[in-house]
Amino acid sequence: MDKRESMSRVDRFLRIFTDVRPGEGVTALLLALNVFLILEAYYVLKPVRESLILGQGSAELKSYLSAGQVVLLAFIVPLYGRLVAGFARRRLITSVTMFFVGCLCLFYILGRAGVPLAIPYFLWIGIFSLMIVAQFWSFANDVYTKEEGERLFPIVGFGASLGAVVGAAQAARLIQRIGVYELMLVGATLLILQMLVTNHIDRRVLRRAVHKAAETGTHHHDKVIGGRGAQVFAVVFRTRYLLLMGVMLLVLNWVNTTGEYILGTVIRQRVVETVATGQAGGATVEALIGQAYARYFGAVNIIGLVLQLFVVSRVVKHRGVKIAIAVLPCISLLSYNVLAFLPLLGVVLSAKVAENSVDYSLNNTVRNMLFLPCTREQKYSAKQVIDSFFVRLGDVFSALLIFVGTTWLTLGPRGFALANVCLVVVWLVLAILIGRQYQKLVATGQPPTSR
């Protein structure tokens, strides 16, 4: 039978965007739906965080709580590692998801009872947003082989990009109609739906694996993931490939968070000048800042969606993961070099739109591909350490840099841009080393090993 004739309509449609083989389209779309619901839930819940922390706390408190999230993750990630060591894949994901759903229901009850939730909810959502997304990509890495993942992750990643856009739009409408605390219940419902989709995908993949095993005369059954439980940090620190990824994400987040500070500073300066000179048309400083960020987020989301659909798969296919992982640091290096000489609002906005749109599309997809050659334990336990602990540690380093830069060194946007240039050079070197390691692991067919 001709290859095209054996492909479904879904498979043929998805070939517009990437190289989909017969029978792969439905699972890829289900995974895209899965992560769509996760990101939709997060962006529905995110405005609740801002409402509580700014209403019951302060903007400064947000920076201090980043350190608190790192401390909590140092305890939570090893607990997750114990679950990984003892649970089968479906049971692990169901248990963790239902824990987060239970937390949201508890927050709703306490909030309605008048209990202040700013600090606990801020800490919770910072951990939830990283762990639930990392768990999904662990699952996707477990479902696909290295070759399948490189072809199909661009479709899966589109679900994440679209979910962020839809979730933010829904939150803007719902928060006025049903209230702040009710958004928690909306988020909980979305999480339950995505858990059901995950279970369906797992059963579907398991059936195909059993069918394939029957054809080849082998046996297949769902096993616990295995591993060393509480030693998840040791797995990362003793494995050069994983440690390089952790440090790269730390530096990436350090650079990005500092870049957001530069953007916020420049926007506020321009808005204050506009209002002071009477050119605001009666608008307040807060309203103008909100409008500027709305345009900024809109540009990032739209460009990110286009890149995810039409660029990501082609870059991976024609240039490979080794080159793709170095694209974002190259863009950031150029952007912050320009900002160091021209810290103007239009330049800063353009640089951050370019950086974040590529980060949310190409870079996010490719950095999840880096786990394809890993063992199951590394895909679940080590990925949680890297995608949660190291990322939040990047926030802490950025906060320290901003504190030192504003308190002792009196740095302005130009000074912080120069600091980011130095950090991006480190980031680029790490990306090159990781790309080479990935290529070597793929060539040998062996997972990364401890030193």
Image: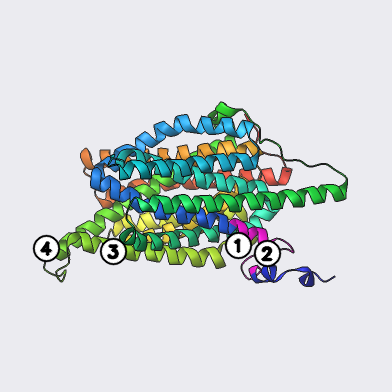
Determine if residue 371 is in view: yes
Say the numbered circle drawn on residue 276: 4
In the picture, measured across the screen, residue 37 lies left or right of residue 424, that is right
Q: Earlier in the sequence, mark 3 or mark 4?
A: 4
Give the residue type that dot 2 points to: Asp
Per the image, the residue denoted by label 2 is 19
The alpha-carbon separation of the residues under discs 3 and 4 comes to 17 Å
The alpha-carbon separation of the residues under discs 4 and 2 comes to 55 Å
Q: Which residues are magenta?
A: 14-31
Instruction: Judge the density around disc 3: few (<14), some (14-19), many (≥20) Cα neighbours within 10 Å.
Output: some
Question: Is residue 151 depicted above or below 367 in this figure?
Answer: below
Q: Is residue 21 magenta?
A: yes
The alpha-carbon separation of the residues under discs 3 and 2 comes to 38 Å
The alpha-carbon separation of the residues under discs 1 and 2 comes to 8 Å
The alpha-carbon separation of the residues under discs 3 and 1 comes to 31 Å
Instruction: Judge the density around disc 4: few (<14), some (14-19), many (≥20) Cα neighbours within 10 Å.
Output: few
Question: Is residue 330 depicted above or below 400 in this figure?
Answer: below
